[in-house]
Amino acid sequence: MAKIRVLVIDDSASVRQAMTAILNEDPEIEVIAAAADPFAAARYIQEEIPDVITLDVEMPRMDGVTFLRKLMSQKPIPVVMCSSLVEEGSETLLHALEAGAVDVILKPRLGVADHLNDSKMRIRDTVKGAARARLRSRSASGRISSPPEKLTADAVLPPPTGRAMSRTTEMVVCIGASTGGTEALREVLEALPANSPGIVIVQHMPESFTRAFAKRLNGLCQVDVKEAEDGDTVMRGHVLIAPGGLRHTLLERQGARYVVAVREGPLVSRHRPSVDVLFRSAARNAGSNAVGIIMTGMGDDGARGLLEMKQAGARTFAQDEATSIVFGMPKEAIARGAADRVVPLHNIARELLMATAR
């Protein structure tokens, strides 16, 4: 099988070296070149077109977002933005996703072993997902380390015991997404009215990014959108986005209302927060009062959990292949028989509202 050919663009020599080593450790990936700025990168692209580009945000002579826009208008190539993400830079990275970037990753923090191992796994998985991405036209170390054990939601929460909970007046919607999900979620949430049922979302993102993402969506949508905090109530007209990077977000029931719990835990299905963890908690604590939706993304996170939701009596949906940037997570869920229906992106909001009508 041909390797995924990657071009690394970063003005830091140490980052170029680290990224090259991390990617080349994976037998499925090959770094064909590393460039210090977009002008040098353009010369490489003239000689050989890579399958994926990792692109720094802040560089001399031309910033990464400007280069991305030029690239997407002339020769679309899957691009992963790579940044030492801080809160102030999150808005810039959101503009990059709007301009056509497939995903965002954090630059590896060298010398912090646990973080570096997590970074390696996410960087490689993100590059592999980007290589499979469907792009839409837009205008203008050395050792091969063993991958960590792939844990299931059992590591955080016991399996459901059966059909959970009697029906209540209010419904709750749980949504999971990954690669391509930021723009897909925007389309869904913008189509919802202000009195929509309460929604909890896990979108795979680095830490510090979800707060800016939620703030951006809140300014675009009729529903209120915020980054979830431990103990937040899930209520009509509100959307809670799981905080990225360090903790899992679960759905719990307190009497007649639902709340979210934000808890520490190991990576599940190679992610934290994990869609499988959210979906399992919905199966256990909401049962037929819930709707589960799995959207575009690389890998299989959420497939098991969506099946558990369906078995607990929830209505379940998967985004179709034609409208998914990466048809990994929905495909796995469909293969397991977890989805009641497979729907295109532009119909998800309508299906959500129909499924929660009482």
Image (tube, rainbow, N blue to C red):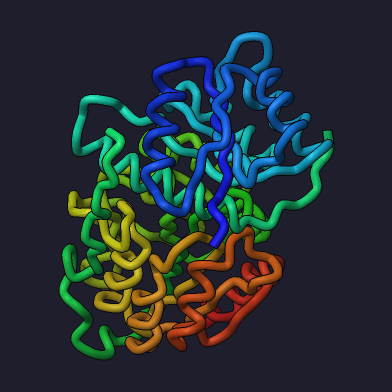
In this rendering, the count of numbered labels is 0
The answer to whether residue 218 shows anywhere in this view is yes
Residue 59 percent coordinates (x, y): 58, 15
Looking at the image, which residue is at 42% across and 43% down?
123
119 vs 320: above or below: above
Comparing 20 with 47, the one in front is: 47
Q: In the drawing, does residue 53 fall left or right of residue 149?
A: right
Comparing 229 with 280, the one in front is: 280
Q: In the drawing, does residue 9 fall left or right of residue 166?
A: right
Residue 21 percent coordinates (x, y): 38, 34
Q: In the drawing, does residue 179 fall left or right of residue 166?
A: right
Residue 99 percent coordinates (x, y): 70, 37
Q: Quadrant of residue 155?
A: bottom left
The answer to whether residue 170 shows anywhere in this view is no
Looking at the image, which residue is at 31% across and 57% down?
270
Q: Quadrant of residue 353?
A: bottom right
Q: Which quadrant of the rendered structure holds the N terminus?
A: bottom right
Q: In the drawing, does residue 145 fall left or right of residue 189?
A: left
Looking at the image, which residue is at 57% across and 50% down?
130
Residue 352 percent coordinates (x, y): 57, 73
Looking at the image, which residue is at 42% across and 70% down?
172
